[in-house]
Image (cartoon, helix red, strand yellow):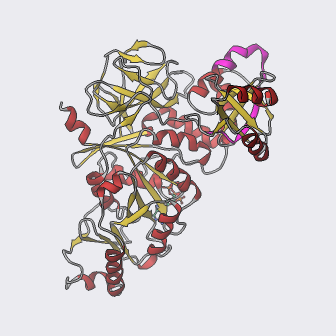
Amino acid sequence: MDLTQEINRRRTFAIISHPDAGKTTLTEKLLLFGGAIHVAGAVKSNKIKKTATSDFMEIERQRGISVATSVMGFEYSGAKINILDTPGHQDFAEDTYRTLTAVDSVIIVVDCAKGVEAQTKKLMDVCRMRKTPVIVFINKMDRNGRDPFDLLDEIEKELQIKVRPLSWPISMGSTFKGVYNMFEKKLNLFFSDDKQRVGDDSVEISDVFTSPDLDSYISPFTATFLEEINLIESVYHNFDREKYLNGELAPVFFGSALNNFGVQELLNCFVKIAPSPRKATTEERLIDPYEPKLTGFIFKIHANMDPNHRDRIAFLKICSGTFERNKPYVHVRLGKNIKFASPNAFMADKKSIVDFAFPGDIVGLHDTGNFKIGDTLTEGEKLHFKGIPSFSPELFRYIENADPQKYKQLSKGIDQLMDEGVAQLFTSKYNGRKIIGTVGALQFDVIQYRLEHEYNAKCRYEPFNLYKACWIESNNKAQLEDFRKRKYNQLAEDKHKREVFLADSSYSLHMAQEKFPDIKFHFTSEF
Ligand code: G4P
């Protein structure tokens, strides 16, 4: 097996969107084209329709049993494609942020009627931070949506990225005619009566301006269409792949995922332009995927919700070298050798034991508690991957033991759930009480439920009004000491014993920042 070839043909990415824009539908259609599934409806939506814990638990249980949906791999046109699934619910945004650390590019789905929504913006902030290349898919063109030019303007403004349409819609809603693929100069016609079609209904037109047949296909929209194409060619620069790869320019496609329209064009272009595995940053140095020695990091831990099988699966993103089954690798944090007898690879909705895996691939490792998010595997080098931060949580509660007999179970449960990245635990320096901080309210219920069902422990919460927890550091020892004395009752430690300031209001945070100018207040754990 040629490592270079294997790396070059890999495309590892995530589809992200505001809930309901069509992420699940698009994922499914991509898998259909990849031949990875054969019927629509095979991909389970991980969307939580009601904000109900029971709903979440049901989905988690299903996913726990079939963890394969976390990564969907398939072969298409010589490429090995890995789609990383991200949770749809905004309370699990942090899970999505972490998944974004393991992808080399992203497809953003935007609803043509709703435009750029709140969650899309937040996710794009993370992509921008990491300079992740993004492609935008404007979905639901079979419905009446906004003017395509307005949408492009909004994307540029709200997502702060230059855009370049590579396909262009001809009308929309009930008069939607199709999409002109500017990348391949093909016209794709839309037949709304054939909803689940996977076929080739494209007409090749080498020059839309001189084609005598164009009008017969798209009348009465021919004149408007030609005007728009003219406008695009004059307003937007030619597509520049380098800019796309640097995260400065987003190619835009239009279509309808539900009708399987415009999806294949997207996929064909994606395979051509999307990056193969990129260099990864560690505290020590840049890692080139083509290096022969294995390096990789854990970006996700999935608990098995089946109480009969308590093991977890840690998801390893391979960053360089070849991963081999049964070969010992160094777990850098623990400083010990570990080998894996049954590592899993993921293909569509199945998982199977894999002998070799390459940069860009995700391998599922059975874990009995060795792994935390961010852990590194190497062949001996002491590396620490960057870019897997914890974000400053926004909701806080004290967590208390509700069953004194089960103290041990509770603390083991809390420990493991925190390692999985479900929430963050802080310990008050003032009174030693444990505080759980989360990004979404649903996590509190999830923690309580899982402690009870997986660890046989009971917890109860007490309210704790807090604005933000932020990590602090300073080179000015005297100022830091002074701060510690004055703010003693507002200091805590995170699970790595780093110092955290618990600000009860934005005002008090602001005052602290002003009074102690040499102290840095960080809103992510990586600084
Ligand atoms: P998400 O994962 O981003 O949350 O979105 P999802 O794919 O679940 O799609 C959200 C809703 O939008 C679904 O309808 C889906 O059928 C619909 N949808 C997706 N793509 C298109 C499209 O191209 N055109 C139209 N008209 N609708 C589209 P739902 O009623 O919420 O769910 P379901 O019960 O139909 O599955």
Q: Is residue 195 above or below residue 473?
A: below
For image coordinates 60% across by 33% down, the residue present is 422
Q: Which residue occupies 44% across, 73% down?
A: 148
Determine if the magenta segment contains residue 403: yes
| Residue 447: quadrant of the picture | top right
Q: Which residues are magenta?
A: 391-412
Residue 122 picture location, percent across and down = 56, 52
User: Which residue is drawn at the image coordinates 33% and 59% (left, top)?
Assistant: 266
Residue 364 versus residue 103 in the image, above or below:
above
Please name whichever residue, 7 or 430, is drawn nearer the observer in this view of the structure. Answer: 430
Q: In what quadrant of the picture does the C terminus appear? A: top right
- Regarding residue 473, the answer to whether it shows in the image is yes
Q: Which picture quadrant has residue 139? A: bottom left
List x then y, in percent, for residue 185.
23, 70
Regarding residue 195, the answer to whether it shows in the image is no
| Residue 37 picture location, percent across and down | 34, 46
* Magenta segment includes 261: no
